[in-house]
Amino acid sequence: KRIAIFASGSGSNAQKIMEHFKYSHDAEVALILSNNPDAYVLQRADNFEIPSHVFDKHAFYHTTEIVDLLKRLDIDMVVLAGFLWLIPQSLLRAFPNKIINIHPALLPKHGGKGMYGDRVHQAVLNAGDDEHGISIHFVNENFDEGEIIYQARFRVDPGDTLEVIKFNGQQLEHLHYPKVIENLLKKYN
Ligand code: GRF
């Protein structure tokens, strides 16, 4: 099975996924895609000798470039890992139920357009939530709204800072995302 990862930034989740599948016989990360030519995830792809592709808004929303590339490389599953653009209908239709995302909160709380990075954790603190966590979900035409596949949670203690809850969430993301991907791939023929 062949995985493509979309990421806009650092790519620490992409890193964990590349590590996880590096010696797997069942699946491999075949391509890293980014809308951001300066994204550190591209360096990480080079380190793993995994091909990468950078695209712009026009190509993504108004051409078949990306779907064609994913089909040409025989991609089975599309993984979003810190990718900030909405997925166009054409891509959703080309990979039905094969595109997943990770969000650093317990959806349906603290999701939607503009809710990413530190803003999510700040919202958790502002709301006084006593728990926080991560969600892995199928992608649909709206930000952070597809069916939830997996969630992991942790307690927020009084006095926890943004840095603390962010770190706790990242640890859970790195631990669970590769395994959830592996389990989903097992269900594919
Ligand atoms: C993660 O927190 C993920 O949940 C969110 O964006 C962040 C990406 O971090 N969608 P990284 O680039 O994988 O380090």
Image (spheres, rainbow, N blue to C red):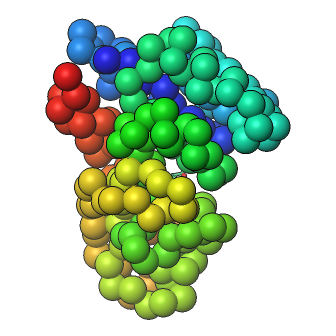
Across and down, in percent, residue 44 comes to 58, 24
**Relative to 64, 2 lies left or right:** left
Residue 155: name its quadrant: bottom left
Q: In this orientation, which residue lies closer to the viewer: 4 or 172?
A: 4
Residue 137: name its quadrant: bottom left
Across and down, in percent, residue 183 comes to 20, 35
**Relative to 84, 4 lies left or right:** left
Reply above or below: 37 against 26: below
Question: Residue at point 62% right, 52% down?
Answer: 86
Reply above or below: 176 against 47: below
Question: Residue at point 31% right, 59% down?
Answer: 148
Question: Residue at point 61% right, 20% down?
Answer: 68
Across and down, in percent, residue 79 comes to 45, 37
Question: Residue at point 39% right, 30% down?
Answer: 77
Q: Can see residue 165?
A: yes
Across and down, in percent, residue 87 comes to 59, 47
Which quadrant of the figure contains the N terminus? top left
